[in-house]
Image: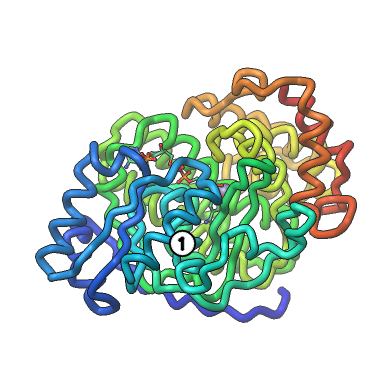
Amino acid sequence: MLNFTLHIPTKIIFGKGEVQRTGEIVKEYANKVLLVTGRSSTKKTGALDKVTRSLEAAGVEYVLFNQVEPNPRAETVDQGGQLARDEQCELILALGGGSAMDAAKAIAAIAISSRPIHEYIRGNKTGLWKQLQPVKEALPVITIPTLAATGSEANSNAVITNWETKEKAGISGPALFPRAAILDPELTFSVPAHYTADGAVDMFSHLYEVYLTGDENANVQDEMTEGLMRNAVKYAKTAIDRPEDYDARAHLLWTSTLALVGIANAGRGGSNPVHKIEHTLSAHYDISHGRGLAVLTPAYFRKIIIKDRPHRLARLGRQVFNISLENDLAACDATIEALVEWFKEIGTYDTLKNLGIKKEDLKMMAEETIRVGGLGKNSLDGTHPITADEVLSIYEEVF
Ligand code: NZQ
Ligand code: ZN
């Protein structure tokens, strides 16, 4: 196990009806907030009403910024930052999926610095979004997730897209940890089947990527990760079949938070190459992040992991999908089959072509993946340095 420092300052308030305590919780930190949401779902589902009523009851003033699109864009974040400054908001309150929560964190940073969000990424003068500067100053943030997927509710990351340059990348830093996260599983009852499935794949990916690429001598983390992966698999189908099954929604939401809060992955190092390979797809084609991961994962296992670390993929299969084969390579094949079966069952099995991606763009996107996500080398970090040719071969395999 590698050395690590873990400091998670986010207070987590979890459970049925807890959204009604929003005003009281926010009031501990601020009297006036910018309330950041997506464009329509929170209004339709009634979540926005619940939050604004609670704020009003607690005497917290709010300004609504409901312009965040899925895969949030730099210009939207810049507008939100300007509004937070103009209105002298003291805290940014996010209500929504990963997109609203990520935009809220980025807005919290630029509300203080008055800089455009793209300046937070070093190398920006050449248009490169890489080598992140840790964000040390931001307004306080509180999150209320309405979709179980990213774990953004309790981590210090935000992923933003510069649509003009087609670059999607994260910012991160201690100041972006939410002060509190209000996790009310009932807010996720309305998530449609396809986003429920994509979200389950996203949390599963946050777990398997580091499990497969990181230090192998971290059994505590391995067993936590395996347990969380089993829960993502187990509850996704139930939540799709019975959207208002509280237990299924609660387990999915807590799994998504724990998958990327830092605990399961502490002391492992490791990397997330599949995320980087996916981010290029959503930067160019604006597709759902979880759906992109679902398309890429079987090919990543076949092209990279089965060659580099078959024993780890075999262990994943045995622990998560009950594969009983003793030979590692045979167990890997069976694991990939079981994974594809799960994706089909929850309706997230797909191809790049079906997502509207053009074959002639694959080579360019493989090169872009290395340029934007490659951290200064000619390759992506993984079980070995992954080259643009290998990224292309993954894209081609699932076209
Ligand atoms: O936009 P609105 O109208 O709010 O509707 C959203 C959106 O259309 C809808 N939705 C959300 N909650 C709902 C609901 N519909 C009905 N009922 C509800 N309760 O779902 C759609 C997708 O929402 P979005 O927020 O885009 O999805 P998700 O939570 O998957 O977030 C994806 C974004 O997070 C980034 C992704 O790259 C992507 O930009 N990520 C953030 C991470 C982090 N901060 O740590 C890590 C992840 O790996 C990921 O990269
Ligand atoms: Zn993700």
Q: Could you say which quadrant of the image residue 174 lies in?
A: bottom right
With 102 as the anchor, is 369 left or right in this view? Answer: right
Classify 10 Å Cα crowding around label 1: few (below 14), some (14-19), many (20 and above): many
Q: Residue furthest left?
A: 57
Where is the N terminus found, in terms of image quarters?
A: bottom right
Amino acid under label 1?
A: Ile
- Which of 178 and 258 lies nearest the eye of the viewer? 178
| Residue at the image position 13 percent from the left and 70 percent from the top | 59
Q: Quadrant of ligand 1?
A: top left
283 over 169 or under it: above or below: above
> In this rendering, does residue 146 appear at all?
no
With 96 as the anchor, is 395 left or right in this view? Answer: right
- Which of 387 and 328 lies nearest the eye of the viewer? 387
Where is the C terminus found, in terms of image quarters?
A: top right
Q: Could you say which quadrant of the image residue 135 lies in?
A: bottom right
182 over 352 or under it: above or below: below
> In this rendering, does residue 294 appear at all?
yes
The residue indicated by pointer 1 is 107
Measured as percent of width and height from the top left, residue 391 is found at 81, 38
With 113 as the anchor, is 41 left or right in this view? Answer: left
Measured as percent of width and height from the top left, residue 170 is found at 62, 57
Q: How many marks are shown on the rendered structure?
A: 1
Measured as percent of width and height from the top left, residue 128 is found at 75, 54
Measured as percent of width and height from the top left, residue 180 is found at 35, 70
